[in-house]
Image: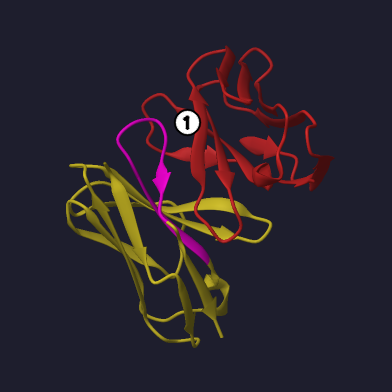
Amino acid sequence: QKEVEQDPGPLSVPEGAIVSLNCTYSNSAFQYFMWYRQYSRKGPELLMYTYSSGNKEDGRFTAQVDKSSKYISLFIRDSQPSDSATYLCAIRGGSNYKLTFGKGTLLTVNP
Amino acid sequence: SQTIHQWPATLVQPVGSPLSLECTVEGTSNPNLYWYRQAAGRGLQLLFYSVGIGQISSEVPQNLSASRPQDRQFILSSKKLLLSDSGFYLCAWSVGPGHTFGSGTRLTVV
């Protein structure tokens, strides 16, 4: 079983839709949960990170972590064409410097 | 503010040629530094990380090596490139949980 699983999509939605992106992980030692956005031919940029179970909101973005199910989600409200990108989840253990990434989900928001 | 510089942006190299990619970080001291490779359909693969000058940890046996001659400089090298070395190479740094990435180098080995 891979450490982090992410549906690669692609996912295509109309402008204004609510988008749900998800990852599952296998190692209960993971403590930090992150979402990155990557535009084509660019480096990933950190959108949000959370340390514990629950929700964290930042504008139109909400990150959700359920440690009991080993499941993390990113919700995008009122999606915009500028949100079109690949979204990668990433997870890290407590004392480990390394991040384990999902393969990314390609999202297209159509105007 | 912290910035990360990575160059070149694109590179086309023949099989068997050497490689040197450089990454520098500004605005922070003693960062953890990382080299990743991103190949189509395979996600981000950690190649090397460094917690200090001269300290390199390798994650994947391969044709590549890394060095950290200065606190904020990280170099990825190869003596002889293989076709399978093609990909998008990303340098990153961290002082907290998240990593900050550079703009990447797209390497094509022909």
For the residue pair B32 and A108, the one nearer the viewer reads as: A108
State the quadrant of the C terminus of chain B: bottom right
- Location of residue A4 in the rendering, given as x and y in whole percent from the top left corner: 63, 36
Which residue is drawn at the image coordinates 36% and 62% (left, top)?
B6
Is B4 magenta? The answer is: no
Crowdedness of circle 1 by 10 Å Cα count: few (<14), some, many (20+)? many
* SS assignment for the magenta stretch, majority: strand
Residue beneath label 1, please? A92
Magenta stretch bounds: B88-102
Question: Farthest residue in the front direction?
Answer: A111
- Horizontally, is A87 left or right of A100 in the view? right
Colour used to depict chain B in the structure image: yellow
Is B91 magenta? The answer is: yes
For the residue pair A59 and A107, the one nearer the viewer reads as: A59
- Horizontally, is B69 left or right of B24 in the view? left
For numbered disc 1, what is the local secondary structure?
Answer: strand
Q: How many marks?
A: 1
- Location of residue B21 in the rendering, given as x and y in whole percent from the top left corner: 35, 69
For the residue pair A99 and A73, the one nearer the viewer reads as: A73
Q: Amino acid type of disc 1?
A: Arg
> Callout 1: residue from which chain?
A
Snapshot quadrant of residue A53: top right
Here the colouring is by chain
Colour used to depict chain A in the structure image: red
